[in-house]
Image (cartoon, rainbow, N blue to C red):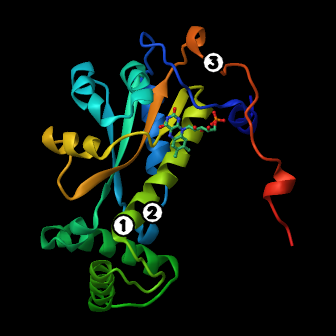
Amino acid sequence: MELLEKLKKRKATKAYNSNQKIDQETLNYIFEFINSAPTSMGVEHWRVLDIKDSNLRKKLLDGFMEGNKQKFLDSSDALIFVTKNREWFTDPKNYQKLKEIGEAKSKAFIKEFNLKSTEAEIMAKVNEEIESLRTGKNLNVLVDNITEWSKRQAYIALGYALVAATFKNINSTPMEGFKKKLTELLIKENLISKHESVAVCLLMGYIDNTNHPTIGKEQIRINIKEKFLIK
Ligand SMILES: Cc1cc2nc3c(=O)[nH]c(=O)nc-3n(C[C@H](O)[C@H](O)[C@H](O)COP(=O)(O)O)c2cc1C
């Protein structure tokens, strides 16, 4: 089936078959797909926790809204997109990491456009960008809230993940139905630092056909003619 046909049939899964797990090869494909998502300034604001362990799921359960708890427990893979907060960018301990990212990106940019720049010029540019992240202002865009800007990047990755899962015939549920407590619980379990937080989640697995209210019904979307304006 063509990708668009599959996407038109995809729906947010509300009940998972807890006995059916995604195989490692498919999972690797989806991870590669997600990892190819772009990020603003190439900063790579997010990382992904894939929570599989049932004991750990029980410990994190209170971090989710009531209606999402059962599917969190039953899904094969529960992805949590974790993003860097403003404090991560302002913490001097992370300057080295930012410098490495900035340097690699600047060198690639210079090669791509055949620019002639010295090492010192590249580093000056990198430092300028790191400084701009600290103040919230940069050359291309005015970033008013760095923490929110980080989270927006995770949604691009979420979009990639939804497409990849659909392509591989995996059912999925994008999930914003979690509480601040989820971030606190992940910090408690030493899975994230206090300078990171949860942006969005994605459950993946196989639908429980026997317990699914919307299975077989059409996707409901506003008509393209109403939603897209060509001038
Ligand atoms: C960012 C985002 C967050 C969502 N959060 C939840 C959620 O917490 N729980 C849930 O059951 N569905 C959640 N959904 C699913 C939407 O309700 C669903 O995609 C929408 O109603 C359209 O239905 P469809 O995708 O099945 O066609 C979320 C969807 C998106 C894109």
Which quadrant of the picture is home to ligand 1? top right
**Crowding near the residue tagged with mark 1, few <14, some 14–19, many ≥20 C-alpha atoms within 10 Å:** some
Read off the residue under disc 1: 43
Looking at the image, residue 27 lies above or below residue 159? above
Residue toward you, 207 or 168? 207
| Relative to 13, 198 lies left or right | left
The local secondary structure at tag 2 comes to: loop
Q: Amino acid at mark 1?
A: Val
Q: Position of residue 95 (x, y in %)?
A: 19, 73
Residue displayed at 17% across by 55% down:
194
Decide which of tag 2 and tag 3 comes sooner along the chain: 2
Q: Within 8 Å of ligand 1, the CB of disc 2?
A: no
The circle drawn on residue 39 is: 2
The part of the image, by quadrant, that contains residue 191 is top left
Report how far apart the C-alphas of labels 2 and 1 lie in the structure: 6 Å
Question: Which quadrant of the figure has residue 91?
Answer: bottom left
In the displayed orientation, state which residue is furthest to the front: 66
- The three-letter amino acid code for the residue at tag 2 is Thr
Q: Are marks 2 and 1 in contact (CB under 8 Å)?
A: yes
- 13 horizontally vs 129: left or right: right
Q: What is the distance, in whole Å, between disc 3 and disc 1 at their CAs?
A: 41 Å
Q: Secondary structure at mark 3?
A: loop
Q: Which residue is mark 3?
A: 213
Q: Residue at x 40, y 84 (%)?
A: 138
